[in-house]
């Protein structure tokens, strides 16, 4: 293994307020001593691990900047090696001068991803963590960042493994049949396989598309607001958004073509889908309200059903209630500022009728609000948070592909399965299916790290920005 | 048992290579070694049992047929001998893709054995000796010095190839009857195991079995389905002229077990030596006994039973599919429950045999022991099963023993070159708990490893080794050239939408052309072929008579499956990248911190030569391989 001490600028090279230059390797502390001038006589190499030292960064006689030296000794550092971080006053010139000086005194410029590579090699992280680090670096905001890590560790891996399991099952079946034709028959297997492969392809297609969607949606609770026209859906949305983003009138139906809005409150994010639908009541579908619930509720993590409490319930309300009663939902009795004709008890009894889950704690919450007067909104947020933390709504049940490498691996697998379907359609013997099934299997393995490929390793580590 | 000689005698004759055992591995090993010019001495416990087929009376079959053709392409003998001694021949899986077409021939067992023995006897540099080898002699550096036989005689040599088959401490068992003999009641070799253990070799104990042989005159064939051979017989050996082997064939017969058979077996399972614990060895899952099948496929109403002749000069018939180690009375009952076998007389009882073999992970891919210089091994001794698997390993072990003496590097075929490569790689890299049987599913790149192109894949290697004569090599080069030139030409010749073209297409039920295309593209259509579009091809060259058929076959296959072949080749490229990533000998796995403990232990024990090999060791995970890859690539920068 390369034992050179490496150095790189770890912050973005801009005119920022502060810059960090990082150095890792057995010589890191010794090199730092050559460029450190502190008030005390004590050398950095005589200092304890995990200590910070104020002083000047010097190149011989020349003082370059007033800096802080952070010492982290092996193995308790990011790379697992002796590491020195130099915090300086930003500025392109200063940061570059510091790096050049370190190189002059014996460090080598780090290659992209080399710090993480060393961390990996020194047993500080596994490959999937290493890849998550790339996503962290590449993520612009903290929200996406959080998801990158959890994605790789959880959802995506699980989903990909399911797909792979299915593929390997069929491959194994065919292969076993080839070797034991007496006991395992392949008659009409192509027909069966075609259905499976089509299903797999559509799952993959969803994942591939989620890469693009994912950019817009990021992570959040997919929420749909349903209710009859003029129940107050738009007003509710505006209150939640905390600003007058939609023109609200007493006349139902306002056009604004936004597909979705993201609402953050504290640690929770709601992705309100089809906001245009809420606002556009020229839409025939919207007029009924039920159809909207049907259309989106299937994919939604949470349904918010808004009832105008000042108007009696009708057929449409009954249908919506019927529809949401076995789903993750909450009911808002809006317009408490007006005289109420619909009460909590009435809705509760409708919701309870024929409900599959009769546990009290799983009851659909019913809240009274006035979107107009912004009353009950705080309580609503609390209820949503509680539902989330009690696991009643899952944190985005959909799976998103967040990096392009995963996307292209999926694309390859998808293409291989297309070949399988072609083989079936053109009447090729079963033993031909395996070639493309295995290709699909291996491509998917590239996502989870089960497939061993030199290219994969190179690709992962070259994607790092230098300073990590 | 430890051997102690009563009297020692030193044989002063000069030998380079000693081969222990004259089964299918030993025959190939000794022929290869002697043909490469080395004085070779072949030991067998019984000269009358050279190339004995103690189990099924056939050579080849699914994937095993591939092995025979590969052995032939490298200059081995098995294909030639079966071509001279078969009594029925069949290309299996014709309804499937060309990758799984496999040749299988019923052999006249006695004739096969005699014919092979004649080849050995007439081979220059090869000497046959009937005696049991009891000790392997090495010097202080664990380098081969010679062997010692039961008679006390010492033979000096520079390399030894062990092909002991199922004879080491062999024991045959059925019911509560147990006899310490090799197959067919032949003498077991009871001493060598101890000598091997003293050399530090780890031994396993495996078992396998064989069904009963029945008297043909007591079988009612009218209740069975007759199984004929192919009308046009395809030879195994690329050197055999197909015209010379077209002959009358005998039939095999198919019948089935039934519920009654299964009941008899189930009621008597407790009397099986496997249940009573008399047998300790591990048996093959892929060649199961009838009692295993009844247990494993409990809901199957019947199992196939093939009645196959053992030869032309005997009435013995092999009852394929019903190997067993149940007691004699149960055997009679169960065989007689099968339609056509109601009155069957059993000549030889079915039995299970257990024997000592090695954990082949002690071998290099050249089949030389990692820790004993000059000691090679092949066949069932290495934990495989089957005549063809044995022959393949014997050939490679024999070649590599010779190459060691020639100071040349060993021949190692990789998984993308040959079934032989897959076989040996699996044996020396993977944990193997049962007799290893070759199967098509084990070959990842089987579309490239077809039985029809074994000569194109391996003849050049055989020539380089020195087992393929110049004439045969030149013929192969010509064949390859003709295939290439003719394929290239077909891609260049265009045909339009003329009346003649459309009519021909119509006649074969093929969609008419909308615009012009090439001859190659026409051949790619499933309903067409090189021969079928003959009349559209004005510039077709005259192919030499003796190559014509073979060249056309290759052109058709290459064109029809071009897309698949290309994709498989891409897989191979990916595979080779990892195979070519060598792991330095002096690597210190303990220093690589990210490796899991289990991986470090396995890697240290088996010391793989490449990343590809390392990835196939059980207990080494993909994550460990990633670590290794990165470790190796970061090391490069310093050097």
Image: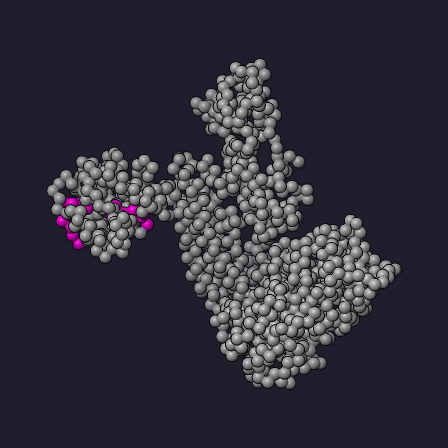
Q: In which quarter of the image is residue A138?
A: top left
Residue A425 image point, x, y percent: 47, 63
Horizontally, residue A129 falls left or right of residue B285, namely left
Magenta-drawn stretch contains B448: no
Q: Give the range drawn in magenta.
A: A299-315
Picture residue at 67% right of the left edge, 58% below the top: B203
Outermost residue to the right:
B12
Q: In which quarter of the image is residue B164?
A: bottom right
Picture residue at 44% right of the left edge, 61% below the top: A194
Picture residue at 49% right of the left edge, 70% below the top: B298
Q: Is residue B466 above or below residue A111?
A: below
Q: Nearer the viewer, residue A367 or B466?
A: A367
Q: Which of B286 and A321 is in front in this view?
A: B286
Residue B570 image point, x, y percent: 57, 52
Q: Is residue B432 visible?
A: yes
Picture residue at 13% right of the left edge, 41% below the top: A338
Q: Can residue B513 be seen in this view?
A: no
Residue A26 image point, x, y percent: 60, 29
Q: In which quarter of the image is residue A7?
A: top right
Q: Nearer the viewer, residue A441 or A180?
A: A180
Total labels: the figure holds: 0
Q: Is residue B494 above or below residue B625?
A: below
Residue B639 image point, x, y percent: 66, 36
Which part of the image, by quadrant, shows the N terminus of chain B? bottom right
Q: Nearer the viewer, residue B369 or A218?
A: B369
Horizontally, residue B533 falls left or right of residue A141, namely right
Horizontally, residue B453 falls left or right of residue A35, namely right
Horizontally, residue B170 falls left or right of residue B490, namely right
Magenta-drawn stretch contains A308: yes
Colouring scheme, one of rainbow, by chain, secondary structure, one colour: one colour
């Amino acid at each position: 293994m390369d034992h050179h001490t490496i150095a790189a600028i770890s912050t973005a090279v801009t005119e920022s307020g502060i810059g960090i230059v990082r150095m890792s390797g057995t010589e890191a502390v010794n090199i730092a001593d050559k460029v450190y001038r502190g008030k005390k006589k004590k050398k950095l190499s005589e200092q304890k691990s995990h200590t910070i030292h104020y002083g000047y960064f010097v190149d011989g006689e020349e003082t370059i900047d007033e800096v802080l030296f952070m010492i982290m000794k092996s193995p308790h550092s990011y790379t697992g090696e002796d590491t020195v971080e130099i915090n300086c006053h930003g500025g392109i010139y200063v940061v570059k001068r510091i790096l050049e000086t370190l190189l002059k005194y014996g460090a080598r410029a780090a290659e992209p991803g080399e710090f993480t590579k060393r961390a990996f090699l020194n047993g500080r992280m596994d490959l999937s963590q290493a890849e998550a680090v790339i996503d962290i670096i590449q993520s612009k905001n903290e929200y996406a960042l959080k998801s990158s890590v959890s994605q790789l560790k959880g959802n995506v891996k699980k989903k990909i493994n399911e797909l792979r399991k299915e593929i390997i099952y069929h491959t194994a079946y065919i292969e076993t049949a080839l070797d034991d034709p007496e006991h395992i028959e392949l008659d009409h297997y192509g027909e069966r396989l075609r259905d499976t492969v089509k299903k797999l392809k559509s799952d993959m297609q969803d994942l591939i598309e989620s890469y693009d969607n994912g950019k817009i949606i990021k992570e959040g609770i997919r929420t749909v607001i349903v209710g009859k026209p003029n129940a107050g859906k738009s007003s509710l949305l505006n209150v939640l958004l905390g600003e007058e983003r939609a023109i609200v009138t007493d006349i139902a139906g306002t056009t604004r073509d936004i597909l979705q809005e993201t609402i953050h409150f504290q640690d929770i994010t709601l992705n309100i889908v089809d906001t245009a639908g809420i606002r556009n009541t020229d839409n025939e579908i919207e007029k009924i309200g039920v159809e909207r619930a049907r259309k989106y509720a299937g994919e939604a993590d949470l349904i918010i059903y808004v009832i105008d409490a000042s108007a009696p319930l009708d057929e449409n309300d009954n249908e919506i209630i019927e529809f949401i009663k076995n789903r993750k939902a909450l009911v808002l009795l809006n317009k408490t500022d007006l005289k109420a004709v619909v009460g909590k008890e009435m809705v509760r009894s409708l919701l309870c009728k024929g409900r599959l889950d009769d546990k009290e704690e799983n009851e659909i919450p019913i809240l009274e609000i006035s979107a107009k007067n912004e009353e009950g909104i705080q309580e609503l947020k609390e209820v949503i948070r509680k539902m989330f933390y009690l696991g009643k709504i899952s944190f985005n049940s959909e799976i998103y592909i967040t990096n392009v490498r995963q996307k292209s691996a999926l694309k390859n697998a998808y293409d291989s399965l297309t070949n399988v379907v072609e083989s079936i359609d053109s009447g090729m013997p079963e033993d031909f299916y395996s070639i493309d099934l295995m290709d699909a299997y291996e491509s998917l393995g590239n996502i989870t790290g089960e497939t061993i490929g030199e290219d994969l390793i190179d690709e992962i580590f070259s994607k790092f920005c230098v300073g990590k | 048992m430890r051997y102690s000689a009563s009297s020692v005698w030193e044989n002063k004759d000069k030998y380079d290579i000693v081969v222990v055992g004259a089964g299918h591995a030993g025959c190939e090993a000794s022929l290869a070694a002697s043909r490469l010019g080395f004085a070779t001495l072949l030991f067998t416990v019984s000269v009358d049992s050279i190339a004995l087929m103690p189990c099924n009376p056939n050579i080849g079959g699914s994937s095993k047929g591939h092995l025979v053709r590969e052995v032939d392409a490298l200059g081995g003998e098995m294909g030639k001998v079966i071509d001279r001694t078969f009594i029925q021949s069949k290309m299996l899986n014709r309804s499937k893709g060309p990758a799984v077409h496999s040749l299988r021939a019923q052999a006249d067992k006695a004739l096969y054995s005699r014919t092979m023995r004649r080849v050995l006897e007439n081979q220059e540099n090869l000497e046959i000796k009937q005696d049991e080898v009891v000790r392997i002699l090495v010097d202080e550096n664990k380098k081969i010095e010679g062997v010692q036989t039961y008679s006390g005689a010492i033979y000096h040599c520079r390399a030894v190839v062990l092909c002991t088959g199922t004879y080491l401490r062999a024991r045959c068992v059925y019911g509560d009857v147990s006899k310490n003999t090799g197959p067919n009641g032949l003498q077991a070799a009871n001493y060598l195991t101890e000598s091997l253990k003293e050399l530090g070799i780890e031994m396993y104990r495996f078992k396998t079995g064989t069904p009963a042989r029945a008297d043909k005159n007591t079988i009612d064939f009218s209740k069975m389905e007759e199984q004929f051979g192919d009308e046009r017989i395809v030879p195994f050996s690329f050197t055999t002229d197909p015209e010379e082997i077209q002959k009358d064939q005998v039939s095999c017969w198919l019948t089935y077990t039934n519920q009654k058979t299964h009941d008899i077996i189930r009621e008597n399972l407790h009397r099986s030596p496997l249940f009573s614990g008399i047998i300790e060895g591990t048996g093959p899952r892929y060649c199961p006994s009838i009692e295993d099948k009844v247990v494993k496929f409990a809901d199957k109403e019947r199992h196939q039973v093939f009645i196959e002749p053992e030869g032309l000069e005997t009435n013995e018939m092999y009852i394929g599919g019903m190997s067993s180690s149940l007691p004699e009375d149960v055997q009679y009952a169960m065989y007689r429950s099968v339609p056509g076998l109601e009155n069957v007389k059993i000549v030889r009882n079915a039995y299970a045999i257990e024997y000592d073999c090695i954990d082949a992970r002690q071998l290099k891919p050249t089949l030389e022991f990692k820790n004993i210089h000059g000691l090679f091994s092949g066949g069932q001794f290495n934990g495989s099963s089957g005549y063809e698997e044995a022959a393949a390993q014997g050939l490679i072990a024999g070649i590599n023993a010779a190459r060691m003496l020639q100071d040349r590097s060993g021949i190692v075929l990789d998984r993308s070159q040959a079934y032989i490569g897959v076989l040996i790689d699996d044996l020396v890299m993977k944990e193997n708990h049962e007799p290893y049987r070759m199967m098509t599913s084990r070959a990842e790149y089987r579309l490239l490893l077809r039985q029809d192109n074994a000569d194109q894949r391996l003849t050049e290697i055989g020539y380089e080794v020195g087992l393929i004569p110049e004439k045969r090599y030149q013929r192969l080069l010509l064949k390859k050239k003709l295939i290439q030139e003719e394929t290239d030409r077909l891609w260049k010749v265009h045909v339009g939408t003329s009346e003649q073209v459309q009519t021909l297409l119509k006649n074969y039920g093929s969609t008419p052309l909308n615009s012009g295309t090439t001859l190659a593209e026409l051949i790619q259509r499933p309903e067409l072929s090189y021969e079928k579009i003959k009349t559209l091809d004005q510039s077709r060259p005259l192919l030499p008579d003796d190559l014509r058929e073979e060249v056309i076959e290759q052109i058709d296959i290459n064109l029809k499956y071009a897309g698949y072949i290309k994709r498989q080749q891409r897989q191979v490229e990916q595979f080779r990248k990892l195979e070519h990533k060598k792991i330095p000998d002096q690597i210190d796995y303990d220093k690589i911190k990210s490796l899991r403990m289990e991986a470090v232990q396995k890697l240290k024990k088996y010391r793989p030569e490449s990343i590809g090999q390392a990835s196939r060791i059980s207990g080494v995970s993909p994550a460990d391989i990633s670590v290794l890859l990165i470790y190796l690539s970061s090391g490069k920068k310093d050097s």
